Image (spheres, coloured by chain):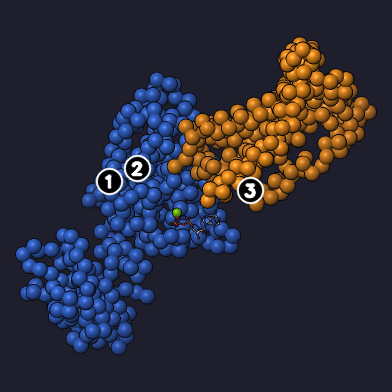
Chain colours: A blue, B orange
């Protein structure tokens, strides 16, 4: 894990606030990113992801708060003085320039001599796997190729940080997956601190070192993908990231951490100390924490009927009706046994240690 | 179906005739300077006239200066309005329309009052000053066309994203306009330029009241004193205007190579 490496803070955001016409869209955000880290800003549309990114880039001025890069406040710097690379959702390649001139634009502005510049452009073309495409114009490239050129253009002047605002959302699913892996690989190779904005939780989980989950201008949780997924700290994170089962239960004995669930009494270690007897609580768990109880040692066992069967390839997702509750669960596609039929009675097992009790 | 198509052709033919017949008649008349038959003598006489060459090149120079000055004002202004102050657009559009609303004669009397020899800025006292004033008057006259052409060009590109992309790569405002925005609206800019040229080449009122020997004034002079040469001149000025329009079309044809966006 990354903990073994010495952590070095690179970007620090302090009490950042931004208001648009009386509407506060960033509400006092505090964050600290390490050098070389790949961080995703994840959240639903309108939660302020782009606004935070644009304040880092210098396109928006914060109402209050500070942005520090390696300890220095960059608030006073114009975007063209910040030495930051940025990739936009809409590619934003210069249509009048060919690929090589697009990539070389930042170098030309920095007055890099021509031979060096050409060498650097070649190097970048190789990095993005588009050697030989230098003479083409943007309109002669596919969306994925254009976005790779945009990445190369952002990286060519060796910026100290890379910002990407939903760079993949205009592309189709296959390319999206391969390109995000390519972006991640290039980022690792260069060791450049990267902030990646997305509203796609799968994308964020798959490529980030750490994820910032945002909701209506607030940081809900900041942590590594497995923490965000397995130990969501708020109801919002739990429901926004991944699929979540919610079972309604009643507290039986708060002191003994037991609840009554569908007629049986079970022990829930995660029951908060603040719970009171007779109170309704929501027990949540991931689909993969629920299994068909054919002999497996799970301490919560419930009976129900198969309500839905979705075949997802290597995994089959079942929806099981438990009377007053329903759960989704995943089972592996075992080619020798057919999946349970619709309406068939099943018994499910849940490990009580996988159950979370969410605060409202 | 068929008769519908026939009718549209008939209407097209009538429309075309309405424009072309007078033009052809003028052309035919311009060739009849000699009794013996058709000759191009009227054209030869026009082209060899020193005053034609002088007035035409003067108009051309003033036109080109007006275009350059106009672009230096209009491109940054239209760009800025689109990028930073879109709420000002209706106001700016109204201002650029003023030269169409206010007759040129009022403009020129205003100039004569403002810049006469006893004024604080006596531009009309010298030849160069008057040339400058005429050029600026043409800049104003061309404003509605220039602004609209440039604004249309800006509409075809994503001004904000391109600006930000260039900005974060280190470019300042002037560089962004010169290297990123301008090359992408060059076709629109040129069509505005040719429109301006066409207007300047035919302009009469302002130049004549400022006592400048422009092409329009020369045409008027010749028209008052000769018979066949004015017809030849009319044809020549048509060819110039149409040439300018043709150039706009031609440029638009070449545009996709560089200016097409995904
Ligand atoms: N320039 C602006 N003027 C006024 N309101 C704005 C401006 N930019 C953003 N907003 C508002 O601020 C809020 C946050 O916008 P932002 O673009 O940061 O969201 P986002 O998280 O990036 O969403 P999305 O996923 O849709 O891109 C939205 O309600 C948006 O309407
Ligand atoms: Mg956004």
Left or right relative to A308: residue A159: right
- How many numbered discs, if any? 3
Compare residues A57 and A183 and report the one nearer the observer: A183
* Label 2 within 8 A of ligand 2 by Cβ: no
How many neighbours does mark 2 have within 10 angstroms: few (below 14), some (14-19), or many (20 or more)? some
The numbered mark at residue B85 is 3
Query: Hey, which quadrant is residue A220 in on the image?
Result: bottom left
Precedes in sequence: disc 2 or disc 1: 2
Compare residues A19 and A77 and report the one nearer the observer: A19
Write down the residue under mark 2: A144
Write down the residue under mark 1: A178
How many neighbours does mark 1 have within 10 angstroms: few (below 14), some (14-19), or many (20 or more)? few
- Residue A108 on image: x %, y %: 47, 27
In front: label 2 or label 1: 2
Residue at image location 28% in from the left, 81% down from the top: A248
Compare residues B140 and A36 and report the one nearer the observer: B140
């Amino acid at each position: 894990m990354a903990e073994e490496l010495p952590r070095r803070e690179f970007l620090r955001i302090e009490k950042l606030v931004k208001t648009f016409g009386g509407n506060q869209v960033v509400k006092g955000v505090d964050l600290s990113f390490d050098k070389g880290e790949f961080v995703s800003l994840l959240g639903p549309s309108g939660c302020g992801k782009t606004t935070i990114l644009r304040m880092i880039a210098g396109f928006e001025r914060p109402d209050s708060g500070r942005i520090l890069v390696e300890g220095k406040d960059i608030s006073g710097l114009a975007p063209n003085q910040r030495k930051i690379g940025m990739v936009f959702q809409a590619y934003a390649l210069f249509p009048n320039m060919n690929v090589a001139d697009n990539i070389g634009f930042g170098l030309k502005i920095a007055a890099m001599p021509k031979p060096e510049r050409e060498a650097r452009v070649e190097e970048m073309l190789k990095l993005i796997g588009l050697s030989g495409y230098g003479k083409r114009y943007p309109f002669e490239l596919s969306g994925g190729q254009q976005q790779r050129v945009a990445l190369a253009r952002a990286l060519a002047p060796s910026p100290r940080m890379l910002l990407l605002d939903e760079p993949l959302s205009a592309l189709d699913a296959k390319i999206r997956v391969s390109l995000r892996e390519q972006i991640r690989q290039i980022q690792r190779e260069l060791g450049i601190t990267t902030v990646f904005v997305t509203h796609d939780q799968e994308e964020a989980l798959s490529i980030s070192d750490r994820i910032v989950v945002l909701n209506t201008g607030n940081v809900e949780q900041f942590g590594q993908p497995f923490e965000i997924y397995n130990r969501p700290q708020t109801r919002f994170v739990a429901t926004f990231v991944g699929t979540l089962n919610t079972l309604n239960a009643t507290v039986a004995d708060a002191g003994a951490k037991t609840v009554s669930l569908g007629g049986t009494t079970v022990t829930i270690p995660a029951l908060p100390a603040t719970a009171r007897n007779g109170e309704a609580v929501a027990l949540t768990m991931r689909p993969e924490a629920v299994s068909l109880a054919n002999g497996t040692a799970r301490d919560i066992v419930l009976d129900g009927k198969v309500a839905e069967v979705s075949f997802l390839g290597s995994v089959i997702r079942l929806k099981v009706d438990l009377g007053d509750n329903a759960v989704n669960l995943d089972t592996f596609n075992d080619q020798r046994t057919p999946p349970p039929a619709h309406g068939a009675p099943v018994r499910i097992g849940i490990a009580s240690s996988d159950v979370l009790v969410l605060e409202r | 179906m068929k008769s519908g198509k026939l009718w549209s052709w008939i209407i097209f033919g009538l429309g075309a005739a309405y424009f072309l017949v007078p033009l052809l008649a003028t052309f035919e008349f311009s060739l009849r300077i000699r009794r013996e038959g058709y000759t191009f003598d009227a054209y030869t006489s026009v082209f060899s006239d020193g005053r034609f060459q002088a007035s035409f090149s003067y108009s051309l120079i003033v036109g080109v200066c007006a275009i350059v000055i106009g672009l230096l004002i209009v491109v940054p202004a239209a760009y800025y309005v689109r990028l930073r102050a879109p709420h000002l657009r209706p106001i700016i559009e109204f201002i650029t329309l003023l030269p169409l609303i206010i007759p040129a004669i009022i403009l020129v009397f205003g100039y004569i009052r403002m810049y006469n020899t006893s004024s604080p800025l006596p531009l009309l006292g010298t030849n160069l000053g008057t040339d400058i004033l005429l050029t600026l008057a043409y800049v104003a006259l061309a404003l509605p066309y220039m602004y609209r052409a440039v604004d249309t060009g800006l509409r075809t590109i994503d001004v904000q994203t391109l600006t930000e992309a260039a900005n974060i790569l280190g470019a300042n405002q002037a560089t962004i306009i010169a290297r990123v925005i301008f090359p992408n609206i060059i076709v629109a800019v040129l069509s505005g330029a040719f429109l301006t040229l066409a207007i300047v080449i035919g302009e009469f009122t302002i130049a004549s009241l400022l006592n400048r020997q422009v092409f329009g004034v020369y045409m008027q002079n010749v028209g008052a004193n000769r018979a066949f040469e004015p017809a030849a001149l009319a044809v020549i000025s048509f060819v110039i205007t149409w040439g300018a329009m043709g150039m706009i079309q031609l440029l638009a044809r070449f545009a996709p190579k560089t200016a097409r966006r995904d």
